[in-house]
C-alpha cells in the first residue's frame, strides 16, 4: 500500500474518532434517541439527564467558538437541579455561585479545554432555566416556549429521568447584543457519526479492491 493511501485511511479514521469523541446516545423520556456531544459525566445511578448551559456568546462575544455545552448527570432517588449542580461544582466540572440559600444561580463558569475558552456570564444572575424531554423543542420566550420554564428555585425543581435541563444566559439589566442567540442550543453531534463511519468503511473497501 502506498504512503498516500495510508494517509487517506489515517485521516478518515481520525475524522470518525473525533466525531465520535463525546458523542452519547441519549434516550429521552418521550422515546427519542439522539446523539449529544457530552463534555463529561458526573454522578452515579440508573437515572440520566443532560444539562445544557448556553452562554449565548455573552461570555467571549464573537470570539466564542461554541456558546453551549452539555454535561451528563446520573443519580438515584429524588434529586433537584440544585443537587445536580452541587455535584458538578464539587467535582470541578463547573464553577457555580448561587444565592438566596442556594435557590438561585448567580454564575456558571466552565473552562473548555478543547477550544481553550473560559465561559463565564458577564451579567451575574441573568439566566433562564427550563426542562424538556423533547430534544427538538424550541426554547422560545417566557410564556411562549416548548420547554417547561423553571418557576421556582433550583432547590425546588426536581430532575426527571430522560430529560434535558437547560440553563440559558440572558441579560436582565442590559440590551442583548446583536450577535447573541437566545435560542438555547443543544449540542447535537453533526454530521451523524454513522454516516462518517459508512464513508470511511466505503473508502477502505475501495482501497482494498484497488490493491487486488
Image (tube, rainbow, N blue to C red):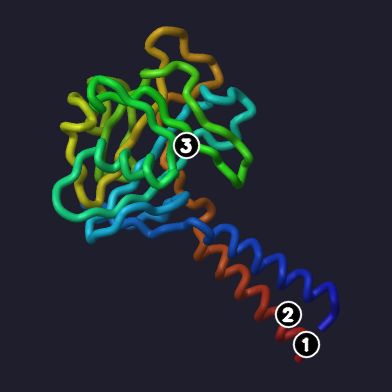
Q: Distance between the residues labelled 1 and 2?
A: 6 Å
Q: In which quarter of the image is the N terminus?
A: bottom right
**Residue linked to disc 2:** 207
Q: Quadrant of residue 191?
A: bottom right
SS at badge 3: strand
Mark whose residue sits in front, 3 or 1? 3
- 68 horizontally vs 129: left or right: right
Q: Nearer the viewer, residue 105 or 127?
A: 105
**Residue linked to disc 1:** 211
Mark found first going from the N terminus, 2 or 3: 3
- 145 horizontally vs 200: left or right: left
Mark found first going from the N terminus, 3 or 1: 3
Q: Residue 166, relative to residue 177: is it above or below?
A: below
Q: How far apart are marks 3 and 1 (CA)?
A: 45 Å
- 189 horizontally vs 165: left or right: right
From the top left corner, tell me how far across and down residue 107 is, in percent: 41, 25
From the top left corner, tell me how far across and down residue 142 is, in percent: 27, 20
Q: Residue 68 carries which label?
A: 3
Q: In which quarter of the image is the C terminus?
A: bottom right
The residue that appears at 44% across and 44% down in the rendered structure is 93
The residue that appears at 36% across and 22% down in the rendered structure is 106
Q: How crowded is mark 3: few (under 14 residues within 10 Å), some or many (20 or more)?
A: many
Q: Do the residues labelled 1 and 2 touch (CB within 8 Å)?
A: yes
- 119 horizontally vs 163: left or right: right
Q: How far apart are marks 2 and 3 (CA)?
A: 39 Å
Mark whose residue sits in front, 2 or 3? 3
The residue that appears at 71% across and 85% down in the rendered structure is 208
Amino acid at each position: 500500500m502506498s504512503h498516500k493511501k495510508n494517509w487517506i485511511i489515517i485521516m478518515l479514521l481520525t475524522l470518525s474518532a473525533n466525531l465520535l469523541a463525546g458523542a452519547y446516545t441519549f434516550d429521552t423520556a418521550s422515546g427519542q434517541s439522539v446523539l449529544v456531544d457530552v463534555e463529561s459525566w458526573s454522578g452515579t445511578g440508573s437515572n440520566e439527564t443532560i444539562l445544557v448551559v448556553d452562554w449565548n456568546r455573552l461570555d467571549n462575544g464573537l470570539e466564542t467558538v461554541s456558546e453551549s455545552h452539555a454535561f451528563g448527570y446520573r443519580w438515584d432517588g429524588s434529586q433537584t437541579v440544585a443537587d445536580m449542580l452541587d455535584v458538578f461544582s464539587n467535582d470541578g466540572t463547573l464553577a457555580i455561585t448561587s444565592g438566596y440559600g442556594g435557590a438561585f444561580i448567580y454564575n456558571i463558569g466552565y473552562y473548555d479545554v478543547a477550544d481553550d475558552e473560559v465561559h463565564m456570564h458577564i451579567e451575574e444572575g441573568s439566566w433562564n432555566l427550563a426542562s424538556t424531554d423533547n430534544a427538538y423543542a424550541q426554547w422560545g420566550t417566557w410564556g411562549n416556549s416548548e420547554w417547561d420554564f423553571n418557576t421556582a428555585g433550583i432547590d425546588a425543581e426536581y430532575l426527571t429521568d430522560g430529560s434535558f435541563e437547560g440553563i440559558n444566559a440572558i441579560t436582565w439589566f442590559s440590551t442583548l447584543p446583536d450577535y447573541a442567540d437566545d435560542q438555547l442550543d443543544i449540542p447535537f453531534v453533526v454530521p451523524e457519526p454513522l454516516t462518517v463511519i459508512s464513508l470511511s468503511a466505503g473508502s477502505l473497501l475501495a482501497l482494498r479492491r484497488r490493491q487486488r
